[in-house]
Image (cartoon, rainbow, N blue to C red):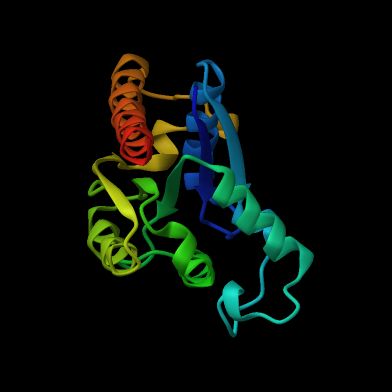
Amino acid sequence: MSHIAIISASVRDGRKSHNVALHLERTLKATSNSVDLLDLREFDFPLFHERLKFMKEPPARVVEFAERVRKAEGVIIVTPEYNGSFPASLKNIIDLLTTDWKGRPISICTASDGQFAGTQVMVELLFPLWKIKAWVVPSSMQVPKVGDQFGEGGSILMDQEGWERRTKVFLDDLGWAMEARRRMEA
């Protein structure tokens, strides 16, 4: 059994990628894993002027967020694609916790209203994660036309069997990386 954090990166009104995060949360809750959904919209962080490790008196919400990420054996980032990149809310927390990402298995799920499923954001997101030495799991889950695929509460609207299969592969690969890290640390 593993503890997995899901970061829902969109803070916009009418966001659709959050429904994918809810789908992943529901799927994980049906397994022996525990899951913690970290919704950046709920945290509503300001733009950080400094990394957590250098803050003299960090706000309680920042400390709470950091501790919840540190508790996770693996992290899933669910991000929309905005103009070929990822939202500033996500960059903000990546930079906030630079040292906490090191060696942590991270899986990336991208979502887009278009048919390319957030493929452009993958490249944009890989560079900062590699730079801080996060262990980015090679497989990803990419959701095209997200509003047609997932509905409120994470319901699957189209191709139930296909999304269940893709989700299983995505989560199994993260599970493999978390198990590998446990064995390396033993």
Q: Residue at x 46, y 32 (%)?
A: 150
Q: Quadrant of the C terminus?
A: top left
Q: Looking at the image, which is closer to me, 125 or 74?
A: 74
Q: Residue 174, percent across and down? A: 34, 34
Q: Residue at x 27, y 61 (%)?
A: 126
Residue 173, picture quadrant:
top left
Tally of numbered tags: 0
Q: Looking at the image, which is closer to me, 151 or 39?
A: 39
Q: Residue at x 29, y 60 (%)?
A: 121
Relative height, residue 102 to residue 47 (above, below): above
Q: Is residue 7 visible?
A: yes
Relative height, residue 165 to residue 96 (above, below): above
Seen in the image, is 155 located left or right of residue 138?
A: right
Q: Is residue 109 visible?
A: no
Residue 175, picture quadrant:
top left
Q: Residue at x 32, y 14 (%)?
A: 161
Q: Residue 32, percent across and down? A: 52, 16
Q: Residue furthest front?
A: 186
Q: Residue 2, percent across and down? A: 49, 28
Q: Residue 147, percent across and down? A: 44, 40
Relative height, residue 135 to residue 176 (above, below): below
